[in-house]
Amino acid sequence: MPGLAFGSILFESSPLVNSLMSDAGEQVKKFFFTSRRSHEAGQHEESLEIYIPELLQASYSFYTWPSAPVLAWFLWENRQDLVGKRILEIGSGTALPGIVASKCGAHVTLSDSANFPKSLQHIKRCCDLNNITSQVKIIGITWGQFLTSIFTIGQLDLIIGSDCFYEPSIFEDIVVTIGYLLEKNNNAKFLCTYQERSADWSIEHLLNKWGLVCTHIPLTDLGADSGISIGELMQDHTIHLLDIRRAT
Ligand SMILES: C[S@@+](CC[C@H](N)C(=O)[O-])C[C@H]1O[C@@H](n2cnc3c(N)ncnc32)[C@H](O)[C@@H]1O
């Protein structure tokens, strides 16, 4: 395991994720991504291991939310489309999807609120553990605020985000930020996973207001190629994947 310094106490394991507790109270989760690919020469297995440090007593951004592995698996299963793509992750937290995208050959910028410097530091720690620090950018992007960082990102092909729509009072800030970025990058789209927390929550009216449209991407076959269970991946939550673009 690259660059990890901790006493390895295994306290949870499943085919998808192992957790190890460090001396400093940091839990490092190991995520496995596998798939069988058919080639002319026959089937061959590809795999990827990602190490995510978590601080369980801390705030939202130091824990990997159930939506993150779902988006990460979707990216992994579509990794042939990621090579060379310029990707921004918003509300990265522990940045599992963005790290997977980087490992699959995308040019990735990871972000979290500019008001949370410790979260940005933690993203760097996540990148360090996966040996990708030199190939990703980490910036502060606060939803609904137009700071210098948002004007200097450069061109984007794809924006990703997991579990950003978790608190209705910030939904419009996210949609405004995405609307601005998609206006600057007409052919880009925003792929985001969200966890169903209340049947009353909706972003439909905000998407209409800011000239965006969304489609649901079905997840029923996610992981089938690797023999993983979608139920285990979602950890008994209901998680959806949206593709959001500019209305034409
Ligand atoms: C529920 S967590 C999800 C984290 C990660 N994407 C995941 O799925 O594990 C929400 C994330 O949004 C970030 N966040 C909260 N408010 C924000 C804001 N106003 N601007 C940008 N990021 C924000 C938090 O710091 C946190 O990382």
Image: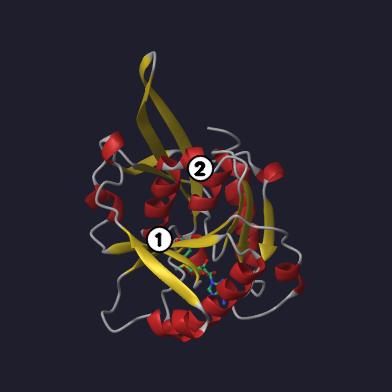
Instruction: Decide which of 79, 122 is in the foreground and name it.
Output: 79
The circle drawn on residue 123 is: none
Instruction: Decide which of 48, 122 is in the foreground and name it.
Output: 48
Figure label count: 2
Instruction: Decide which of 220, 130 is in the foreground and name it.
Output: 220
The circle drawn on residue 81 is: 2
Amino acid carrying mark 2 in the image: Asp
Q: Is residue 23 above or below residue 179?
A: above
The image shows residue 153 at horizontal and vertical percentages of: 72, 62
* The quarter of the displayed image where residue 35 is located: top left
State whether label 1 is within 8 Å of ligand 1: yes
Residue marked by disc 1: 65
The image shows residue 134 at horizontal and vertical percentages of: 71, 43
> Which residue is at a point 52% across and 82% down the rendered structure image?
210
Mark closer to the observer (2, 1)? 2
Lateral position of residue 225 relative to residue 89, left or right: left
Can residue 79 be seen here? The reply is yes
Amino acid carrying mark 1 in the image: Trp
Q: Find numbered disc 1 in the image and state the secondary structure of the residue it sits on.
A: loop
Q: How is the image coloured?
A: secondary structure
